[in-house]
Image: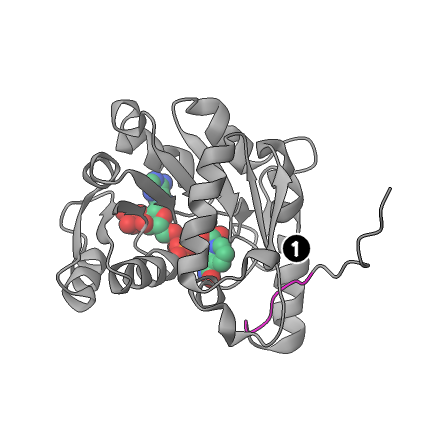
Amino acid sequence: MKIGVLGTGIVGTTIGARLAQLGHKVMMGSRSATNEKAAAWAQAAGENACHGTFADAAKFGEILFNCTSGVGSLPALELAGRENLEGRILVDISNPLDFSQGFPPSLTVCNTDSLGERIQATYPELKVVKTLNTMNCGVMVDPTLIPGDHTVFLSGNDAEAKARVMDLLAEFGWQRKNLIDLGDISTARGPEMLLPVWVRLYGAFGNANFNFNVVRAEQTPA
Ligand SMILES: NC(=O)c1ccc[n+]([C@@H]2O[C@H](COP(=O)([O-])OP(=O)(O)OC[C@H]3O[C@@H](n4cnc5c(N)ncnc54)[C@H](OP(=O)(O)O)[C@@H]3O)[C@@H](O)[C@H]2O)c1
């Protein structure tokens, strides 16, 4: 599959490398066609990898990953160009974190709205699927880093898009029983609001090798 990865940070490079390793054709996008981090990533990731601008990557991919900063997500999509987003699935991994006042970061949007919803509302031509934002990027692409069952949430309006993203998560190694479809894109509020907890767990543990796990009682007939 041809996939566009928007973002040159640790999430973009980690997701992009894993997708290329799995045999997908991956283009990484950034604000500049000559971004040094993107060029180094493409060199290291091999023949399935290339890079360009946000617009180049959006045009290239049938599925796009949003791995840009929370404050940069809407500007990056604007640079990608509405005409290049038509019909694309956008796997939205971003978090609306504001580090401008130091640590811990605050959320730029919460409670009655979310970044996932703002992206979907701004770009109705996209099929936004919010997922993977509640864990470190190493865990996203290799869930075996954490022993036992642990959870990845999905939120989005388009059932077929969520099913395709679930297939990609399975390629990363996620077990189907650990994928929780929360519902439409408004359900992205909860996973985004888990970030203040995630950040404090990171502080308490001193590393990012953990994840949330939802434990349920056995299903009983109604
Ligand atoms: N670190 C993790 O493990 C982790 C886990 C879960 C979720 N997340 C979320 O994943 C996202 C990516 O995180 P990250 O640490 O890899 O990267 P990041 O440093 O948060 O973001 C880097 C990317 O954002 C783009 N960007 C920044 N400001 C921009 C602007 N004003 N306009 C357009 N683009 C802009 C940069 O573009 P250029 O390439 O042009 O510089 C770059 O590609 C974040 O939203 C983060 O909260 C991270």
Q: Position of residue 103 (x, y in %)?
A: 59, 60
Q: Does 170 appear above or below 203? A: above
One can see residue 93 in this view: no
Residue with the mark numbered 1: 196
Is residue 160 one of those drawn in magenta?
A: no
Q: Residue at x 25, y 54 (%)?
A: 24
Q: Main secondary structure of the magenta part?
A: loop
Q: Position of residue 98 (x, y in %)?
A: 53, 47
Q: Residue at x 71, y 59 (%)?
A: 214
Q: Does 201 appear above or below 78? A: below
- The image quadrant where one finds the C terminus is top right
- Quick check: 40 left or right of 74? left
One can see residue 57 in this view: yes
- Describe the element under mark 1 as helix, strand or loop: helix
* Magenta segment boundaries in residue numbering: 208-213
In the picture, residue 59 is in which quadrant? top left
In the picture, residue 142 is in which quadrant? bottom left
Task: Specify the amino acid type for callout 1.
Answer: Pro
Is residue 209 one of those drawn in magenta?
A: yes
